[in-house]
Amino acid sequence: MSEKETKPDSAKYNVSDTTLLSEVPSIGRGGIVRTREYLSEIVELPLVDACEELYDKNIKTVMSSACGADVSGGRRAYVRIDYDSLSLANREIADALDAKSSSHDGKRYVSFKMDVDEETTIRDVREWFGLLAGEFQQQPMNWVPRYTLEDLQKEYAGGTRAEFEGEGYHFDSAENIFYESEEHWRKTHEADS
């Protein structure tokens, strides 16, 4: 990508790869990633490419940050991955990359952190995390939640199959199970085809 070319989302922030990280606004929200497209709504611009590549490889990212608040707050840009959802090969890669490990509520995570300062640009962050994402291998999509109709009815205090499908859930009639989205269903079944 040339200096002038950026992801489509760059236009709404009026930034380029040479823009300082300190000028990138914080998104400050998250959510369940039902589709690849949704990543650009909840991931700060410098990390979108890396998080998309990880998602394409069926690796579950759970948190990330690369914005001006990281610079002014003396923090580091980072991507956190659900360690327990990684394949054995990808766990070995994460371990070899010397990621910082943590656990919370019985779940294990690994975080990859990059030092940032007033001179760090969007390009610096994109390239660093792009190289990191490139180290990981494709793996089966084993981490997506699956729900029965009863599970969803309990969660939402009622509802019908049609209502849940209208909310974006995908129903697999062969399994009699709902997925968060058709994309999750497709990615889960890629190895079957």
Image (tube, rainbow, N blue to C red):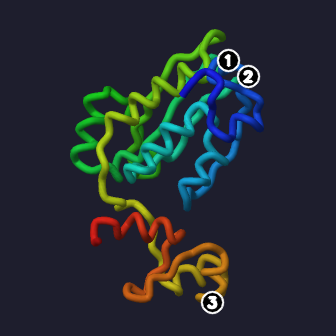
Q: In the rendered structure, which amino acid carries the disc numbered 2?
A: Glu
Nearer the observer: mark 2 or 3; the answer is 2
Which residue lies under the disc numbered 1?
20
Q: Are marks 1 and 2 in contact (CB under 8 Å)?
A: yes
Which residue lies under the disc numbered 3?
160
Instruction: Say if residue 73 shows up in the picture.
Output: no
Residue drawn at x 45%, y 50% as measured from the top left: 55
Residue closest to the eye, 147 or 3: 3
Q: Is residue 139 left or right of residue 160?
A: left
Tell me the SS state at disc 3. Answer: loop
Q: In the rendered structure, which amino acid carries the disc numbered 1?
A: Leu
Q: Neighbour class for label 1 at 10 Å: few (<14), some, many (≥20)?
A: many
Q: CA distance from mark 1 to mark 3?
A: 49 Å
Q: Neighbour class for label 2 at 10 Å: few (<14), some, many (≥20)?
A: some
Q: In the rendered structure, which amino acid carries the disc numbered 3?
A: Thr
Which residue lies under the disc numbered 2?
23
